[in-house]
Structure formats: structure tokens, C-alpha cells
Amino acid sequence: MDFNNYKIKYIQEEEFLSYIDWLTRFKNPFLNFLRTAQKIITKNSLEPKINTKKFEEMYFEEKVCLTKYIWEKSLENLLGTKKFSENKLKNFLIFEEEQTFNTDYLLDFLKYQNTQKPIQNYTKMRAEVFLPIDELVEYFAKQDNKPNFLKRLIEKKNSNLTEQELYEAQTPFASTKVLFLVEGITEEKILPIFAQKEGIDFETNGIKLKSAGGKTHLLKYYAQIRKLLKIPVFILLDADGQDIITDLNNILEKKDRVYLISKGEIEDILPHELIIRAINNYFSTQGAITENDLNKNEPMAKILYNLYKEKGFGEFHKAKFAQILKENIISKEDAKGEIENILKLIQSK
């Protein structure tokens, strides 16, 4: 396909950084590409102008070729070179995807993308839609305050390990080996900190923590993501998750595990000492709470909601409380009991 007569607008430096992030997220790689391609083509094609409707009507191969054309011309403009021959990151990221995702599912996904050519094996198909990023990563490596996704790519690019060794390596930006699926923001904020105090670093161990936003959303998300993933999934549910256990077990794979908290929600299995310390440190000038305030036969969230009102702390919000807890987790003792057991189970996956 010849796009030399197309008039385009160059992708800008800050846009390139965003696109690298989109292209390497923990999602269906082809969806990541299509999302990026739509943005690039609709924003950077000038003549002929291609809007969203026209983009959707294009063959998949046309989307790939035009995106590559705009990307590579913009790279020439940014870097001042026409040579983009480095493939280390491409080779590693494709290898990593093949270890992480169900490639048969991904190839089936491509069958619904208005393709003109026969679907080949995953490695070949993925290589065709891979946009050059090695030189870009090297370019952005000189920047200060680099985001984590860029640090991860820099680490991979600079490593002398093979693809297999890179995938297996325990590093601060390790490849994902387990998806840890939780219901809400509290778990997402505090469990990585608890884990660190137990000597378990989620990043280093390749544990990807994802909050689904409630048990109903979690069930739907698992049903969707399970088809995509090759790696195991560890699911943490509140005690009332029993409501969806039957539906979950109907689709649960053998390598996956569901854990129900013994009572209530995550707040109900936290050590009282931690809750008291967190609240008293944060509201030190407004008042304090004691063990007696928490020692009631009610859900902890309800106790805290009422305590906030009684003590004049304002409205109780779970997300804000999770942040207060996060800042006050100081030792392994804060993760004792059921929290410690959960962390050992996730590490064993």
C-alpha cells in the first residue's frame, strides 16, 4: 500500500510517550494496537482526512500500514534518522505475550477484524502490527521523572539476558506471572504495602494487582479476562462473595483460585492496632479513638462511618481511609493473621 501521497501531521514527542504506554499495557495486544491506530490515523491523517467512521471501514491491513507509515515518518522527524532496525524490545515483548496470553484466543479475535489476508501464527501476525519502539525508548531514557512503564522497557532493553531469562527474572519491573483480582480500592491500595512488610514485592514477583470495582464487576471481568490469559488468576472476595461463587466456579479454571475473606470485608480482618494508629495519626488535632470504639458487633465500615460522625472527622470514604491506612503500615505485625495467610497463598501461585 502506497501512502506517499498522503498528507500527515507528525506525532509529537509527548504523544509518542502516551502511545508507548497504550501499546504495552496488560491487555489484549491487538486491542492495544487498534486503540492506538485509531487515535493516530484520525488525528494525524490530513489529506485524505480519515474520521472514526472511515477508520472502522478500513481493512485491518490498511490500518496497520497507515499507522506504521505515520509512526515511522514521525519518528524520522523526531529522531532525524530513517533507520529503525533495533528489534530487541519487539522480540522480547512478543515472547512475553506468548507466555502470558492465550494466543489462540488472540488469533480468533483477529478473525473479526475485517482482514484480507489469511491468519498466520501468532508470532508472525504480532510482528506485522508491532510499531518500532526501541529507538524511542532510548530517546526517552534521557528524561527525568520517567513513568514506570518506561522504566520497565528501559530495563528490558538494557538487559543482556535472553527472552526466556528476561521473562523469568525477578526484577523491580518483572513480567506478569499471576493476576491478583480484588473487589475494591482498599485492597488495591493496602495489599502491596502489607506484602512488602512480609518481604513479598508484587512487582518483583510478577504479581499484577487489579481492582474490579465490586463483586459483580469482578465476575464479569474474570469471565472476559480468563479467555485471554495463560497465567493463573487469584481472586479475593469479601465474605458476601458467596453470592457469586456458583457462577464463578462454573467458569473457574483449575489453575485459578478463589479465596473468601472469613468475615465481612477487608476492613474487618485488619488488626485494630493498625486502624487506631492510622486514624489517630491522621486526626491527631481533632480527637482520638480507642479499642473500645472498635470493639462492637458490627461491620468495621459501619463502625468507622459512625465514628467519623461522632468524632467530627467528616464523612467516611473508603478510598481516603485506604490511603490513610497505606501511610501507616509500618511492620510485619500489621499484616498478621488472615492478611498474612492471603499473601502467602498468592505468593505460592
Image: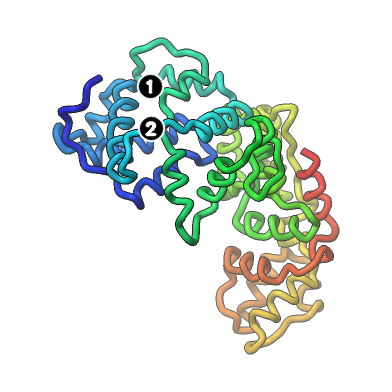
Farthest residue in the bottom direction?
A: 285
Residue 301, given in percent of the width and then of the height, sits at: 67, 65
Q: Which sits earlier in the primary sequence, circle 1 or circle 2?
A: 2
Which residue does the image show at 63% across and 59% down from the upper left? 189
Q: Residue at x 34, y 50 (%)?
A: 13
Image position of 57 with respect to 133: above or below = above
Residue 206, percent across and down? 68, 43
Q: In the rendered image, which quarter contains the C terminus? A: top right
Q: Nearer the viewer, mark 1 or mark 2?
A: 2
Is 243 left, or right, of 103 in this rendering?
right
Q: Callout 1, which amino acid?
A: Gln
Label 1: how many Cα within 10 Å (few below 14, some 14–19, many 20+): some
Numbered mark located on residue 33 in the image: none
Query: Which label belongs to residue 34?
Result: 2
Instruction: Give the answer, above or below, for where 169 lies relative to 129.
Output: below
The quarter of the picture where residue 4 lies is top left
